[in-house]
Amino acid sequence: MVLSNQNTSAQIKPTNAQEAEMMGARKFRMESIPYRKALSVLNQNLVGANPFPCVVNKRVLSEKNASQMALSRRTCPEDTKKPKTSVEEFTIWEDIPLSDVEDQSVSMSLEQTETEITKEDQMEEVEMKDIFEETIMDIDSCDAKNPFAVVDYVEDLYAYYRKMEDCSCVSPGYMAQQFDINERMRAILIDWLIEVHHKFDLRDETLFLTVTLIDRFLAKQTVERKKLQLVDKAYTRKEVLQMEWLMLHTLQFTMSLPTAHVFIRRFLKASQSDKKLELLSFYLIELCLVEYEMLKYSPSFLAAAAIYTAQCTLFGVGQWCKTCEWHTSYSEDELMECSRLIVGFHQKAATGKLTGVYRKYNTSKLGYSAKCEPAHFLVQSVP
């Protein structure tokens, strides 16, 4: 037994080299104790993991992912070994405390979450903008079955009117070539024609066409004051026919050009007007017919400005929608200057001697449109 014990002792007694190696390993284990927690984190990601920097960015594994990872470790081939960790890797962990790693992981996770939330908010804002973005309405869909509305080519008609309205415009300075009449006389004539038109209950188109013919004729032909108004049996039938012949030849028989009436009907449809807005728009544009200075605006522009001013008068604020802008081709800013002039005419419509338009629209038949309070805020907002 003694011999056996001695042999056993001899067998397990380490050599000097082995003893040195064991002492070094024992010392190594003692030095590596502070890094056991770091190694536990590292070992969770050893299989198929990236080097150290990716471990920091790694999110905390859920229970499901952890179980799947453990199963993969058990089923992986034997030749898949855990990579050895060198001492140099320990020194990297020594420079970065574990608490900082955890804080950095949480911080980066929060940053990613905030970025995702911001992107989601931006996408939601874009979607909400698309929902509430104003669309251009199809104003002719309601007349699809009305053959008189000519829905199939109504847009082509108004495109043609746009081209032709330039021919119906006259120079706002044509009165300078008249030696015997002036702007005041023209205003008296137009105001009187409006009263006659209302008395005989003529069509709206007749009034606008009459005013256009007079301005176009006076822009090309000088007229004596006594021949400006051929009415009331003051002239013979022959004199009236002679004046008609002169006008036809001066205008080269071009009589039916687009007037403001042509455009105001279309624009009222685009604005989805009711009867009150329609009557007020006509009241304002007939006030413009009397004023010589409004000849500087084209018929379509004048029609759009009258409707915009009527909207401001009734609602206290401009309601020039995208549909109105599309069909008129005029923006709210473009109409503002003309609209302010119209408000000025509205403010003084009941004063002075030329009150034919005011008296016409101050009746029950036309809804007492003349009694509407003018849109003073448009004039007051001028700097």
Image (cartoon, rainbow, N blue to C red):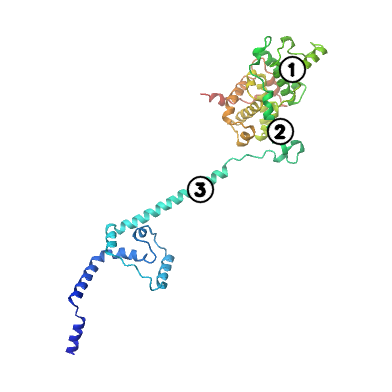
CA gap, disc 2 to disc 1?
Answer: 27 Å
Q: Based on the displayed image, in which of its 4 quarters is residue 64 positioned? A: bottom left
Q: Which of 151 and 358 is in front in this view?
A: 151
CA gap, disc 1 to disc 3?
Answer: 65 Å
Which residue position is annotated with label 1? 250
Q: Which element carries disc 1, helix, strand or loop?
A: helix
Q: Quadrant of the N terminus?
A: bottom left
Callout 3 crowding tier (Cα within 10 Å): few <14, some 14–19, many ≥20? few
Q: Where is residue 253 in the image (x, y as percent from the top left)?
A: 76, 21
Is residue 347 rendered to the left or right of residue 37? right
Which residue position is annotated with label 2? 157
Q: Position of residue 41 (x, y in %)?
A: 34, 64
Residue 322's place in the image compared with 363, above or below, is: below
Which residue position is annotated with label 3? 123
Which residue sits at x=63%, y=34%?
A: 324
- The numbered mark, 2 or 1, whose residue comes first in the sequence reads 2
- The amino acid type of the residue labelled 2 equals Leu
- The amino acid type of the residue labelled 3 equals Met
CA gap, disc 3 to disc 2?
Answer: 42 Å
Say which of marks 3 and 2 sits in front: 2
Q: Which mark is residue 124?
A: none
Q: Outermost residue, right direction? A: 237
Q: Nearer the viewer, residue 150 or 90?
A: 90
